[in-house]
Amino acid sequence: MSKIIENEYYCIQEHKLPIIAVLQDPKLSIRERLVCSQCMENLETDTQTVGWKKVKEQIQSQIQQKQQINNRFKNHLLLQLKQLQTQIEELGNTINNEIQNLLKIIDQWKQQSQVEFREQSSQFWDELDQYFKNQQQNFNLENQQLQEWKKLNSIQIQTVQSKLKYFKEFEVHKICQNILTEIELNFQFVQLKPKLSLPLIKIDQKKTGDPQYKYYQQKMPNQKYKNIIFIGEKEVGKTTLINAFVNYYFGITWEDNFRLIVADQLSTEEILHYYVEPHNQRDYGIHFIDTPGIYGKNDYQTIQKISQFIYENILQIDIIMICIKATRTRLTTETQQILQSIVKILNQEYAKKIIVARTFYSGADDADKSIITDQQSPFFQISQYLSQNWHFEFNGQSIVKKTSYNSAKVYFDSSIKNFQQIEKEQLFTNDSKNEPLKVPNQLYNSQLQRPVVTDLQKPSNPVQEEDYAKIIEDSYNQLKQLLIQTFNVYYYTKYPVKYNQYNQYNQLYKVVNQVTTFQINCKQCSITCYVGFKSENNAKDFFNNFLNQQCYCGCNFNNNLIINQQLWTYQKGQAQTNNDLNRIYNSTQAIFHFLFDLYKLKTQNYKINVMQFFDVLKSEDNTINQGEMQINLTNTQINNSNQFQITKK
């Protein structure tokens, strides 16, 4: 029994006798309703009574139910607040770095001018009063507690928002605001049907049949997840397919009068992550990864972002869902470029992770899967390594939207059947590593090989002389990624205490990737200077005629430059001994100035200065705007000793 129940209570007459009954007369005060045996003898009213033991049992049940409800709300709120705390800590680091940058710039300027639950301590009387109110009206205890939480959260939300508004220019501000909005919306555990109670946010239906609920769940610590990434060009239905999968996963049937979403039907600009909890005796949840759509021909920035994510997490990814409209009779340029990027990453083992989802299937004819496997497709050479069942047709709208059309039920049933088959064949049997995403894979030696596909067909759209602008653009993006990596190693090494790097030393290790295109590599600088040539002769022609035999790194074919089908990238790992900070700094500075020269070649703007170029970098990628990068890299000229070097294991 709760302490408030265990206490002894006496009648208002102070007879000091145990209470035996409670009067059900709403005109009496709470205290006047308690009666003992002596009160009962003198009772002259015909008011109905209820036994004291029964009242205590029901109050105890009410308290326990309230505790259970509050625990659910509290646990989910704590997960949200933990995420909010992490983002605010990141915001603090960003603000601190910006302040320090400004102070140092001012110092330099000065120098040049002269030569910063409620614990619901439920009182017994309150609970007893609530007990009688419950008898007199249609009362929902969960809604009542929800309102209490709303009152508590609204005050805190206003306080946090008042602090955040001063930092609205920072990207993390938007993340924090989203978390606060979700807290303010107050998800509820909704009993949709027997054995299906989920944390949901009620959403407004713009049209009849639209989803009524948005599923909300944070990533649960120590929970096993199956990871599915969705890829495709713009407006191909990736987000709708994710929402359809969620309805299948939770066993939503055609007859159910509700539908769920996990992702808003908005244009996806960044890689987004959605988590659903284990359900129906599954020992795993699902982590859905929604990627930006490829916007137009040669959207290499988006393709590179997605390819890099897949490459870094290939061991953990269970399914690569490539979305192509069922109505397509040939591959668009955007889809070809997506497939080419995937082929460069996967070998025959990883090819089994691929599922091609033909979206917007309308049932007229089976979607033509030969466009994926014919000789003109980038998938031609790996098609033999795909799973036995790799091509499926879906109509996601028939699942996500509630409708009464019989034709929609046909698409609903076939799509659900396909989801079942994919889960059975790809998730039940897939033994991918249950490790967090977005972290470097297991470290190998300095000659770590990226997964390769043997005997790949060369790209169907070869690089011609007029495509040299693409060569320079891809090379620039490749080198910029290396700059970010080297500076991160420098920063973590310089400030080990700040990043909890006690007795841990970071370093970059060279990764040799076998690819189908040709690259210009520099043995002296240990970098890939230019990427993506169709042939060795094409690379030589580019160097001799377009670059006038002058590489930005200062080397040439007479000494250090070579042409081969290797792409040299770098992977962060732990070194066994402390690193020479000056050597790491020199490497970072060298890459920065190499990138500066490559930018001038790319834009043909030879008047830009180093400070202006740093502003360009910040506008292109906000991850570059951190720490002391601007101070350290914009004031020292490159010299021949500042070669990029790596640690040898």
Image: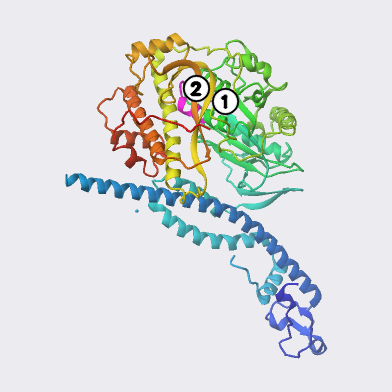
Disc 1, SS:
loop
Q: Residue at x 42, y 38 (%)?
A: 487
Q: Nearer the viewer, residue 444 or 89?
A: 444
Q: Which badge, 2 or 1, comes first in the chain's sequence?
A: 1
Residue type of the residue flagged with mark 2: Leu
Disc 2, SS:
strand
Asked which quadrant contains residue 59, the reply is bottom right
> Which residue is situated farthest in the front direction here?
577
Residue contact between numbered discs 2 and 1, judged by CB atoms under 8 Å = yes
Model colouring: rainbow
Left or right of residue 376, residue 114 in this image: left
Q: Residue at x 52, y 27 (%)?
A: 511
Residue type of the residue flagged with mark 1: Arg
Identify the residue under disc 2. Answer: 567
Does residue 262 appear in this view?
A: no
Q: How far from the left and from the top, in percent, is residue 359?
A: 62, 25
Identify the residue under disc 1. Answer: 450
From the image, give the main secondary structure of the stretch colored magenta: helix
Does residue 375 appear in this view?
A: yes
- Report if residue 412 lies within the magenta region: no
Q: Is residue 193 above or below residue 476?
A: below
Q: Is residue 213 above or below residue 143?
A: above
Q: Nearer the viewer, residue 300 or 135?
A: 300
Q: Residue at x 20, y 44 (%)?
A: 112
Q: Nearer the viewer, residue 355 or 431?
A: 431
| Crowd rating for badge 2 (residues with CA inside 10 Å; few <14, some 14–19, many 20+) | many
What range is drawn magenta here?
A: 297-305
